Amino acid sequence: RITKSKEVTCSAPVNIAVIKYWGKRNTALLLPTNSSLSLTLNQDDLRSTTTIRASPDFVSDRIWLNGKEENINAKRLSNVLSKAKELRKEMEEKDADLEKLSEWGIYIASYNNFPTAAGLASSASGFACLTFALSQIYDLSINLSQVSMLARLGSGSACRSLFGGFVKWEMGTKDDGSDSLAIQVASETDWPGMEALILVVSDARKDTGSTEGMQLTVETSELLKHRIEKVVPQRMLDMEKAIAEKDFDSFAEITMADSNQFHAVCLDSYPPIFYLNDISKAVIKVITALNARSIHTDPSGKKKGYKVAYTFDAGPNAVLYMQREHLSEVLGVIDYLFPRKSTQKVGEYYGKAKEVLEN
Ligand code: PMV
């Protein structure tokens, strides 16, 4: 007998925010308390790859993550799946010639080629990939921003990985989430030569997950209210302007200020959440000292000459953004001060960093 089946394979990269999403105003629909903006990292070594097979012979849906079977009924996953099936069903109801794929079971196998849940945005690439693969297997007639809304139901930051380049997630104002979606601000060729360097300080799973951490911050941080109302709206505008003008100085200032404020609201939560460790702090000091060597103030009072910007997500790993012309210098400094597999103690890093940068 001939078994019918359909299969698709997709891959999606991670994105790292320069204006951070931290806080939900609706925890079921994953609606954020502020808009955010990220860069999608277009490379091969931080990706999720997902294969979905649909068959009328599959009696139930199943999922394997990195080869291990996971619970298909996990809340967020089942929200994404049922929404995608619902959209397919609507199409089938309108067109009787369509195969009844919404009634078939699906098997999903997803792989990350990097550590999962270590603050390296694995949920972002994972859910972006899964959602895009679902939109393909079901031939959903929706655009990428609409796919991003589906991805958002899995993991907020995932909605930004549907696009390449510079991407914003508009928080939206509607209660049903229909305007909370991702939009590409600029493609990577609009501002070419931007490089990201990822410093894996630790690849251990983080101790406070983003869902739990955000809730704690929303419930207890006064500083978060200030950030949401007074800081992020203007920062989004300034960042979009910096990207449009390819103004790395403003880009770097905003990126570092926003990373700092995100970690400040974590610290302002109760109990406080610590994502940065001593090595992360040493990286901040090194980058600050490196920039200080070339920064000058122009007659209008604007600081110019930034070489590199750091940003940290919900973990100790640093992501450094810079323009290609500075990559080898930054890499040289980092490699020298933070040798791989080093047994040096953090205090020595500080000492060495200070000595090198001051001479
Ligand atoms: O989408 P989540 O739940 O993984 O949260 C992501 C939160 C940050 O990475 C810290 C910030 C961001 O905007 O990506």
Image (cartoon, grey):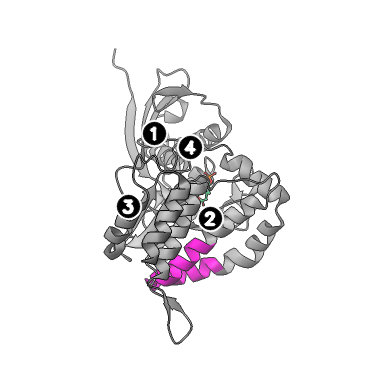
> Which comes before the other along the chain, label 3 or label 2?
2
In this figure, which residue is indicated by the disc labeled 4? 117
Q: Is residue 290 placed above or below 93 in the rendered structure?
A: below
In this orientation, does residue 167 appear? no
Image side of residue 127 versus residue 225, left or right: left
Does dot 1 land on a helix, a strand or a loop? loop
Mark 4 and mark 1: span between their CA atoms? 38 Å
Q: Which residue is identified by label 3? A: 336
Above or below 107: residue 126:
below
State whether the magenta stretch is mostly helix, strand or loop.
helix
- The residues colored magenta run 235-257
Q: Is residue 236 left or right of residue 264?
A: left
Find disc 2 in the rendering and name its residue: 20
Q: Quadrant of the C terminus?
A: bottom left
Mark 3 vs mark 2: in front: 3
- In three-dimensional space, the C-alpha distance between marks 2 and 4, rounded to whole angstroms, equals 17 Å
> In this orientation, which residue lies closer to the viewer: 54 or 167?
167
Kind of residue at badge 1:
Leu
